[in-house]
Amino acid sequence: MTIDDFVLQIDAFNRCWKIASERHGPDSSFARMLRSQKTNLQVELIRVFPSQVTLVEDAESDDYAEAQFSLRLSPPVQLLNGSLRRDANHLPKRLAVEYLPVDFFQLIETQK
């Protein structure tokens, strides 16, 4: 799968998760499954394309219930409609810590 494919799928699952959360509640099994799949795709994106994805702590995390990382893409990914995506949505910090290896975070610290 290409990085473009990952970004498209992450976006699709993110939109579906938000719709399911609104219609069925954020704790519904359907909404949780969609959120989980989005997270799985984000983690896989980071593992497959580590040199093209950077985790950046979102300075506007106050808008969320918990701290978030933005998955920044370098270079940006061009979507089918011609627009450029510079990120692959947000990943809660606690999930990044849970799913990504410790040495990944050590790499982030050394790049600061």
Image (spheres, rainbow, N blue to C red):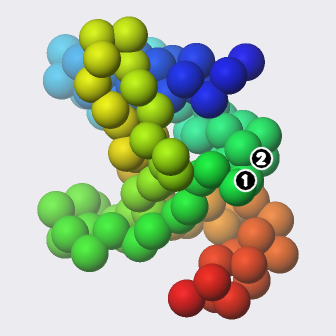
Task: Give the class, few, some or many, for how many residues have Cα within 10 Å of label 2's Cα (few <14, many ≥20).
Answer: some
Q: Which of 54 and 75 lies nearest the eye of the viewer?
A: 75
Give the amino acid at mark 2: Arg
Residue at the spot of label 1: 50
Return the mark for residue 47: 2
Give the amino acid at mark 1: Pro
- Image location (x, y in percent) of residue 89: 39, 43
* Alpha carbon separation for disc pair 1 and 2: 6 Å
- Residue drawn 53% across and 64% down? 55
- Image location (x, y in percent) of residue 32: 47, 29
Judge left or right: residue 20 versus residue 31. left
Residue 1 found in image quarter: top right
Tell me whether the residue at label 1 lies in contact with that at label 2, contact meaning CB atoms closer than 8 angstroms.
Answer: yes
- Residue drawn 24% across and 60% down? 64
Task: Give the class, few, some or many, for how many residues have Cα within 10 Å of label 1's Cα (few <14, many ≥20).
Answer: few
SS for dot 2 = helix
Judge left or right: residue 104 versus residue 97. right
